[in-house]
Amino acid sequence: SLMPPDSSVYLDGRFLGTAEDLSSLGAGLIVDPGRHRLQIVRPGYQAIEKEIEVEPGEEVEVEIELDPSN
């Protein structure tokens, strides 16, 4: 994916791992249906927060690009 591999990924405030950890899983993340908050944080970059809505049985593909903060 597009984010720096050492970015930290949080779901609803829970640390999931680095972008690298998650992409090496190969499989999508299993997430409960409903609304979730995804955060990608890395020093030197603008933190990104996304609301995702997950349908039952749906797999969510997340592609996020971080902008270097000025």
Image: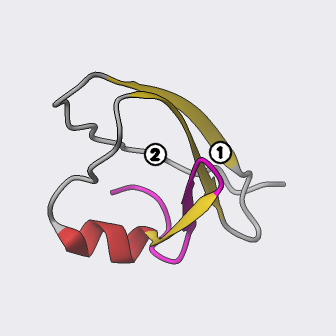
Which residue: 43% across, 68% down? 19
The earlier-in-sequence mark between 2 and 1 is: 1
Q: Nearer the viewer, residue 43 or 30?
A: 30
Question: Residue 22 vs residue 19: left or right?
Answer: left
Q: Is residue 51 rendered magenta in the image? A: no
User: Which residue bears the numbered disc 1?
Assistant: 48
User: Which residue bears the numbered disc 2?
Assistant: 64
- 41, above or below 30, in the image: below
| Main secondary structure type of the part rendered in magenta | loop
Magenta part of the chain: 1-13
Total number of numbered discs in the rendering? 2
Kind of residue at disc 1: Ile
Q: Nearer the viewer, residue 68 or 39?
A: 39
Please say if the residues under marks 2 and 1 sit with CB atoms less than 8 Å apart.
yes
Question: Which quadrant would the C terminus be assigned to in this image?
Answer: bottom right
Dot 2: within a 10 Å radius of its alpha carbon, few (fewer than 14), some, or many (20 or more) residues? some
Dot 1: within a 10 Å radius of its alpha carbon, few (fewer than 14), some, or many (20 or more) residues? some
Question: Residue 24 vs residue 15: left or right?
Answer: left
Q: Nearer the viewer, residue 25 or 43?
A: 25
Kind of residue at disc 2: Ile
Q: Nearer the viewer, residue 26 or 12?
A: 12
Name the secondary structure under disc 2.
loop
Residue 15: x, y in percent?
Answer: 57, 67
Label 2 to label 1, Cα distance in Å? 8 Å
Name the secondary structure under disc 1.
strand
Question: Which quadrant would the N terminus be assigned to in this image?
Answer: bottom left
Residue 11: x, y in percent?
Answer: 53, 51
- 43, above or below 61, in the image: below
Residue 60: x, y in percent?
Answer: 28, 37
Which residue: 46% across, 45% down? 64
Which residue: 74% across, 51% down? 46
